[in-house]
Image: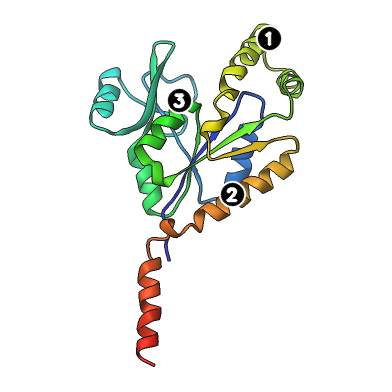
Amino acid sequence: MKRKGLLIILSSPSGAGKSTLAQRLMAWDKTMRFSISATTRPPRPGEEEGREYYFRSREEFEAMVTNGEMLEHAEVFGNLYGSPRGPVEAAMAEGRDTIFDIDWQGGQQIKQAMRQDVVSIFILPPSIAELERRLRSRGQDSDAVIDGRMAKSEAEISHWAEYDYVLINDDIDRAEADLKTILAAERMRRDRQPGLSDFVRGLNREFQSR
């Protein structure tokens, strides 16, 4: 029985392990796809249409919003970003799950649009001190950038209760195992197996023919 694909929302403050867990999920199940956003910002050197982003003019983007072709969207530093509905629905029809790496606001918009098909998961760090240590251990950002990320983390964490599941990432392997357990259970939910009613009717027909 072919199931519908899920929309998996992963959110966390920067440094909590969300990107690593998303990569591990896609390595575990190679049918999963990562949601590619549309944006009105121009491509940067090396970026390709449909790989990093779908690049659209502001007029095209706004028309997509008006026509209900965006699951969520927001404006960031003068550019529009959003998740196109078409590729997600195509993946769902094929039984493929889509991972969204978005914040709580984008997650709320997607829930409103596709509630029955959404599984939302928030990743918490084991402590704020560990969160800052992880950010600094990357060696990629200045002190000012890290301070900004830490300031933003408090607001992000305040929305933890709006998610279906919350994982504390104190051990990445255990968090990965817990994430897989969640997805395995969600995939087997009765309302996500569209052929189940027909299957049970077939069993009943077998009883009647005995």
Please, what is the three-letter code of the amino acid marked with disc 1?
Ser
Mark toward the viewer: 2 or 1: 2
Q: Are marks 2 and 1 in contact (CB under 8 Å)?
A: no
**Other residues around mark 3 within 10 Å, as few (<14) / some (14–19) / many (≥20):** some
Residue bearing mark 2: 182
The amino acid type found where label 3 is placed reads: Gln
Picture layout, residue 92 above or below residue 161? below
Q: Residue at x 62, y 33 (%)?
A: 123
Classify mark 2: helix, strand or loop: helix
Residue 168 appears at what percent x and percent y? 69, 35
Label 1 neighbourhood size at 10 Å, few (<14), some (14-19), many (20+)? Answer: few
Question: Is 136 placed left or right of 11 in the picture?
Answer: right
Left or right: 20, with 81 as reference point: right
Percent of width and height locating residue 57: 30, 20
Q: Quadrant of residue 89?
A: top left
Q: Which mark is residue 105?
A: 3
Q: Earlier in the sequence, mark 2 or mark 1?
A: 1
